[in-house]
Image (spheres, helix red, strand yellow):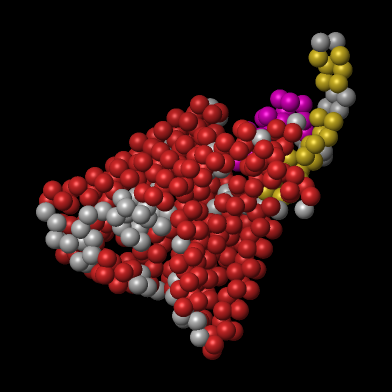
Amino acid sequence: MQTFLHKLKVVFTEPAIRNRVLFVLAALTVFRMLAAIPIPGVDHGVLEQFFTDNQFLGLLNIFSGGGLANLSIVMLGVGPFITGSIIMQLATVMSPALKSMYTEEGEAGRAKFTQFSRMLTLPLAILQGFGFLTLLKSQGVLMDLSVFGFTLNVILIVTGSVLLMWIGELITEYGVGNGVSIIIFSGIVASLPSNVSQLIFNYESSQLPLYVGFSLVAIGIIYLVVVMTEAERPVPITYAKQSRGGSTYGSSSSYLPMRLNQAGVIPIIFALSIMLFPQMVLNILSAFDLPWVTNANEVVTSFLNNQWAYGATYFVLVFLFTFFYTAVTFDPDAVSKNLQRSGGFIPGIRPGANTSEYLGNLVTRLTLVGAMFLGLVAVLPVGMQIATGVSALAIGGTAVLIVVSVVLDLIRRLDAQVSMREY
């Protein structure tokens, strides 16, 4: 407790760290102000009815940072940027040049890679904005707008999405943590007061065991997510004696931390984006009055509303994306080469190909456990919803996973900033 209070004091007394924290708070204040500005022509009565028990919109609202609930100018949120990032990540599998840019060219390569994701954001935002507004117009949520009014709304929400992407980038550069994750996190946290008040308002004495059970499960999920996120396997590293400038340096020992879940919250965001993508495409095609689009839309909607199919697909996608993202971000060959160049080796393992194979097998086993856990925790609320019949639990479970992971990442980054200042 004393160490925590000391670090908290450093955060607020050290000007460099304090300025970063204040910048994040200022950026989130601007975002919440933008999320309160609705686009023109919204029928809020129809909108509220349309949102009732609609799981697709509930999931989409997570990516908008809560801006979708009242159809604000930032209603698309960071969804287009996330989709663009996913496309670029998938492209690394098919393009060796892109993979080399992302993994081998250092910060310059990653900056160029991120720039391509930003360039994809604009066309994706236009497509998503057009498709979603077309859906809302067909459902009567948007009043009968002229072509100019409809085009103006598309321009507004596309501009809002690009602006939000820029705010997220500023948070990443001048603040603390990943800006996109923090924006999603802030939207979830901002919706907590209304959700809690709704639960209190609808409370009946007969539901007390249900409320207590949900609270215990939520606490258990938070505890398990913290434990599994922080869990790591230390790999011992020994550095041989080296001679430099006529001086001989003795051998030393260290360790390579291998996290159980190296991908963090990214697989959840990727999985949800992929599940939402078909609905988005069909919303865009529905503007052209194609006969097969209506049937396809009904199939996709019924699939999303089928808890068993939704839960199974969600688990598989989270599981696969955990392996995929870990494979993209952790390269055993590169780690082995870096160890060999610095004169380090794993005791009992030959440097070079043997070390690479050992690390590859180790990260596969660790990721298997992490992916299973992440998938099971993600679909646990869906199972509870099937068992109890209470809606919106699946969305709540996803929100808990995102919030806990983002908070852990923020604490870790602040701790690193404090340690760097103290040294």
Residue 115, given in percent of the width and then of the height, sits at: 41, 33
Q: Is residue 142 left or right of residue 197?
A: left
- Spot the residue most to the top: 246
Coordinates of residue 407 in the picture (x, y in percent): 60, 52
Residue 302 visible in rendering: yes
Q: Foreground: 171 or 1? A: 1
Horizontal side of residue 28 vs 213, given as left or right: left
Q: What residue is at 59 percent from the left and 57 percent from the top?
A: 404
Residue 334 counted in the magenta span: yes
**Front-lying residue, 181 or 123:** 181
* Residue depicted at x 86% and y 21%: 249
Q: Position of residue 329 (x, y in %)?
A: 57, 41
Is 75 inside the magenta-drawn segment?
A: no
Q: Is residue 249 left or right of residue 421?
A: right
Magenta stretch: give its range. Answer: 328-345
Residue 391 in the image: above or below residue 283: below
Q: Is residue 277 visible?
A: no
Q: Main secondary structure of the magenta part?
A: helix
Residue name at image x 72 percent, y 28 percent:
340
Count of all numbered marks drawn on residues in the image: 0
